[in-house]
Amino acid sequence: MSKILASQLIDLLGGKENIDNVYNCMTRVRVIPRDHSKIDIVNIKKLEGVNGVVDDDEFQIILGPGAAEKTRREMEKQIGEIENKGAAPKKKGVKYLLKKIGNIFIPLIPALVASGLINGIVNFAINSGVDPELAWVQVMQLIGGVFFTIIGVLVGYNTAKEFGGTPALGAISGALIFNPALNEMELFGETLVSGRGGLFAVMMSAFIMAALEQQVRKVVPNSLDLIVTSTITVFIVGLITVIGLQPVGAVLSEGIIVSINWVLEVGGVFAGAVLAATFLPLVLVGLHHGLTPIHLEYIQNIGFTPIFTILGMAGAGQVGAAVAIFVKTKSKRLKNIIKGALPVGFLGIGEPLLYGVTLPLGRPFLTACLGAAFGGAYQALMTTGAINIGVSGISLTPLIADGKYIHYIIGLVLGYTGGFLFTYLFGFKEKMVENLDK
């Protein structure tokens, strides 16, 4: 199936000559085309297995979990070597920045999910009374925690790669920021702190590393490039990182966290409702991964992220809306689409429902957002949080901090119920099914 779909997509994307880069996240194949006008969007939407598209500078095809990676791999096989790999949209601004950050973290999501779930399971067991000194518990903690000992290196690697630098040099940025040896050093009479500035400092350092490397390479003779360019780059950026970027990154990360905490404290239930209700537009264009460093910064600083559970209610609203549509519609085709997308929706992967059901229908997308507000308000009221990210929905339950599992589940149910009621009462009419065939 993936071979056929890959071949069809390549043709409808304008042929392999029109594809500058192709990669995937959990549910989407993402393509950077050379000539956007050559993409046959109408017929791509009609392909079996395609749940929807996002027509942007970076063209996104929503296929669902598993299918996205298989199809991307098959497309790469059929295309062969892609020239200009790493090309990116020319537009700048917040949207561009969020996409760049998303590209840095998207390749890390499988490791985040696996490590997070293992940590969640072992923490759930310990909270249930299992002896933390047992050998199997310690082994699971080791396996679940190892990713977070190298996350700075991986983020630095991906950042340098994303901005056209040598990935290994970017990895040095991550190793510098999180090096335990910093705790034994003093600079200007002040003890340095390993991890200060967090992933924000890593990304800034790796970005500067990539930019400086490109500039140095312009003036260094080719015969000396391997030795001189990398040495000068690492030395200069290393000094900048230790002396300047650590404190700058710390101010930035602490400022973001303080601002979000202020919004939650002042806005309370209302803030939770607004955040949950407005998160789907970010998911809609694939920019939600740009928030990943904020979640991880929270986890590093206080042990959990209080906004992940709130934002996760957006998916609950989708599920509730889809169930309402399933109950009301007479369309067998629509019912089959919902039956196929609901299981992963309950597990926290909402794109198939979003692009296959609520968004094409129109109004149910809005009523799903309104339903999500109920769940978000409750999560804010009970101050739930997640000790890790990568999954949401029911799958997030073992990762809930401070044993607030029941409150998280109640919030989920409220999100499901809100999405169902708003959609059943106000959001769906049978004539909307015609939109799915357009």
Image (cartoon, rainbow, N blue to C red):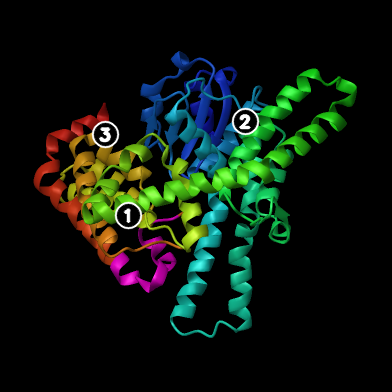
Q: Residue furthest left?
A: 425
Q: Secondary structure at mark 1?
A: helix
* CA separation in Å, label 1 and label 2: 32 Å
Q: Amino acid at mark 2?
A: Phe
Quick one: label 1, few (<14), some, or many (20+) residues within 10 Å? Answer: many
Residue at the spot of label 1: 310
Callouts 1 and 2 close, C-beta under 8 Å: no
- 341 vs 60, left or right, is left
- Tell me the number on the disc at residue 163: 2
Tell me which numbered mark, 3 or 1, is placed earlier along the sequence. Answer: 1
Q: Nearer the viewer, mark 3 or mark 2?
A: 2
Query: Is residue 387 highlighted in magenta?
Result: no
Q: Which label sits in the foreground, 3 or 1?
A: 1
Residue range corresponding to the magenta coloring = 391-408
Q: Quadrant of residue 169?
A: top right
Q: Earlier in the sequence, mark 1 or mark 2?
A: 2
Is disc 2 surrounded by few (<14), some (14 to 19) or many (20+) residues within 10 Å? many
The residue lying at 52 percent from left, 67 percent from top is 119
- Provide residue 343's location: percent of width, then percent of height: 35, 55
- Residue toward you, 31 or 415: 415
Nearest the viewer among 140 and 436 is: 140
Above or below — where is 251 with respect to 56? below
